[in-house]
Image (cartoon, rainbow, N blue to C red):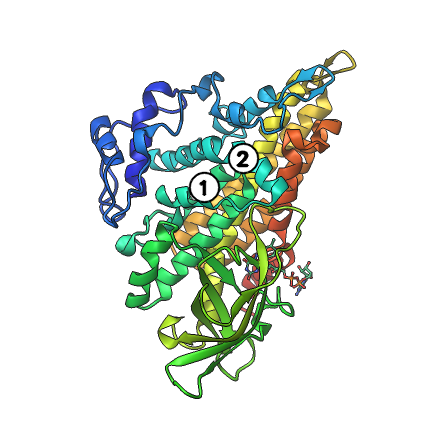
Amino acid sequence: MFRAASAAVRATTTATMAVAPAVTARVSSASKTSATTTTTAKATAAASATSAMGGNRLVAGGSLLGSGNYANGGNVPFAVHMRSSANGNASFGGMTGQKRFATGWATTALSPTSPFSATVGLDDEQLMFYETAAAFAAENIAPHASKWDAESIFPKDVVHELGNLGFGAMYTSEEHGGSGASRLDAALVFEALSMGCPATSAYLSIHNMCTWMVDSFGSDELRAEFVPRMATMEALGSYCLTEPGSGSDAAALRTTAVVSSTDEDVYVLNGEKAFISGAGETDVYLIMARTGSESGAKGVSCFLVDAESDGLSFGGKLDKMGWNASPTRPVIMQDVKVHKSRMLGAPGEGFKIAMKGLDGGRINIGACSIGAAAASVGIAREYVLERTAFGKPLARFQNTEFVFADMAAKLRTSRLAIRDAAKLLHERSPLATSSAALAKLTATEQCFDVINSALQTLGGAGYVADYQIERYLRDARVHSILEGSSEIMRLVTARAIFADQ
Ligand SMILES: Cc1cc2nc3c(=O)[nH]c(=O)nc-3n(C[C@H](O)[C@H](O)[C@H](O)COP(=O)(O)OP(=O)(O)OC[C@H]3O[C@@H](n4cnc5c(N)ncnc54)[C@H](O)[C@@H]3O)c2cc1C
């Protein structure tokens, strides 16, 4: 479905875009999709088609990319939408307005000759994923991201639109409405969306992780009931592993799921989860709870719990440094009854399932850091070309050049690590888990450094919300903490290194 949408968007916009060669013949592999488009006309027809699931998941009119020609630095969609302040007209030493800084967002990521290029080396299909997401971010996310951040708004309407694009179940099988895309395709989408708002893109990653877990480990009935609604993002997911007493040491969790004394088909859940993204606003909670008497990972099972369940409640929304567009709350379970049919996998398999979900989650979060860094670098590049000191543009100082070269090295190696890990996970390589950990470590740490360096090149302006980089910095900071901190990523890597001992 998504592929059809992408093809349509791309085909109907190639006339106005010089960014990449037109795709006039794209034949999807039969194993991946049934949507095959060979001409613009066919693709356009596909764009107005209604999905097999009954919902129109396609983007009407192919207008996502607008009329801009951003390869030529012309009417850049990003440029228009990066203007988020009330007056959009801050002035620092001759720099007026933000539009000029914002153009860099697109040019650095899309220029085929820039070491910051996000798209060189991608095949046509991958390019479509990236471009569709980038265009959506420019059109529907970037213009609002500062407000969502400042006012802690979870943009549910936009999230639902992402579902309409087929982004709710990207690497989930197509049987119940997933897009059947590769892990790399998905990573490209998370990266591109993060150029608008890392927090929104990261929530989408968590939702995708949940959808994939339900589809991969749920019974056929459970999959048929939940995956279609999760794929369209009519039902939003939350992943519930962390507890007040166990974060990095997740297997020490204490939430219990005990067979009911009155109905042996029902489990009764008691406990508390901490730091749950989306909690209080989402519909489906994947809760890891202890069913067995064994301590550690072996006694843990994974349950799908409806938001409406009696006994399920939420603590107050956390006041955070960043990720303000993604609500974080405790989830409290007091005698929550869950039918045994809502267990994913078998009793005792929950921890393994949770970790498998995180392999993908870690790649996605790393991709979100890359998008945030790419956006920051673009803004910084425009700034140093314009801003003068000691009689010349900042860009002409060798220190500035070296800072940008270092940022390019960090961003490029982050991309390579994330994309490599995505391919290995897709291929189910034995290196998949440690590569995901290494890639997350690399990308989240290095890209945070890149954003911080980019901020520094703007001087005082970098510290000002109008220029956006401080938001990317605050959002990206948590990527080295959640879904396994950098220290735990080192632990996972080291375990793989010494596994044979
Ligand atoms: C904004 C936000 C959103 C989140 N969303 C979710 C969510 O949706 N679902 C969910 O389940 N969780 C979520 N989390 C929780 C997150 O995954 C945990 O915060 C993270 O795993 C770290 O756990 P902790 O906070 O308990 O830190 P701790 O485990 O207490 O660790 C504290 C410090 O000690 C270090 N440390 C711990 N063990 C070791 C070790 N063996 N060796 C070296 N250093 C170590 C850690 O790296 C860290 O620096 C979220 C957290 C945040 C901040």
Residue 84 in view in this figure: yes
291 left or right, relative to 458: left
- Residue found at x 36% / y 19%: 16
How far is disc 2 from disc 1 in space, using C-alphas?
A: 10 Å
Foreground of the two, 413 or 477: 477
Tell which residue pokes out farthest to the top in this image.
391
Question: Do the residues under discs 2 and 1 have CB atoms within 8 angstroms?
Answer: yes
Residue 300 placement (x, y as % from top left): 49, 75
Question: Which residue is more in the foreground, 490 or 42?
Answer: 42
Q: Earlier in the sequence, mark 2 or mark 1?
A: 2
User: Which residue lies at the image location 53% right of the left edge and 47% below the top edge?
Assistant: 154
Pick out the residue farthest to the bottom: 261
Q: Position of residue 328 (x, y in %)?
A: 58, 55
Residue linked to disc 1? 158
Around disc 1, counting alpha carbons within 10 Å, would you say few (fewer than 14), some (14 to 19), or many (20 or more)?
A: some
**Residue under label 2:** 144
